[in-house]
Image: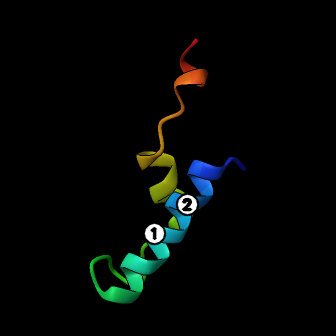
Amino acid sequence: MNKGKSDLNYYISQLKEAGYLKKNTKNAQLLKQAYWNPKLDD
């Protein structure tokens, strides 16, 4: 897993703890929707 993706996963967890995201939010699913890797578009 690259640095950007792991950072985003960390922030998703922090947002859940702070109450900005629902506790039942699935990190992996949200990461898949939110993370864009331009290298994969080639």
* Amino acid at circle 2: Asp
Tell me, for residue 22, which label it has, or none. none
Farthest right residue? 1
Secondary-structure class at tag 2 = helix
Crowd rating for badge 1 (residues with CA inside 10 Å; few <14, some 14–19, many 20+): few
Q: Which residue is mark 2?
A: 7
Tell me, for residue 11, which label it has, or none. 1
Which is nearer the eye, 29 or 17?
17
- Say whether marks 2 and 1 touch (CB < 8 Å): yes
Q: Tell me how far mark 2 sits from mark 1, CA to CA.
A: 6 Å
Residue 22 in which image quadrant: bottom left
Percent position of residue 31, x then y: 50, 54
Farthest left residue? 20
Percent position of residue 16, x then y: 39, 81
Q: Quadrant of the C terminus?
A: top right
* Amino acid at circle 1: Tyr
Residue pictured at 54% horizontal, 32% vertical: 37
Percent position of residue 38, x then y: 52, 25
Residue pictured at 32% horizontal, 76% vertical: 21
Crowd rating for badge 2 (residues with CA inside 10 Å; few <14, some 14–19, many 20+): few
Give the left or right position of residue 36, taking residue 1 as reference: left
* Vertical comparison of 40 with 5: above or below: above
Q: How many marks?
A: 2
Give the left or right position of residue 7, taking residue 22 as reference: right
Which is nearer the eye, 7 or 30?
7
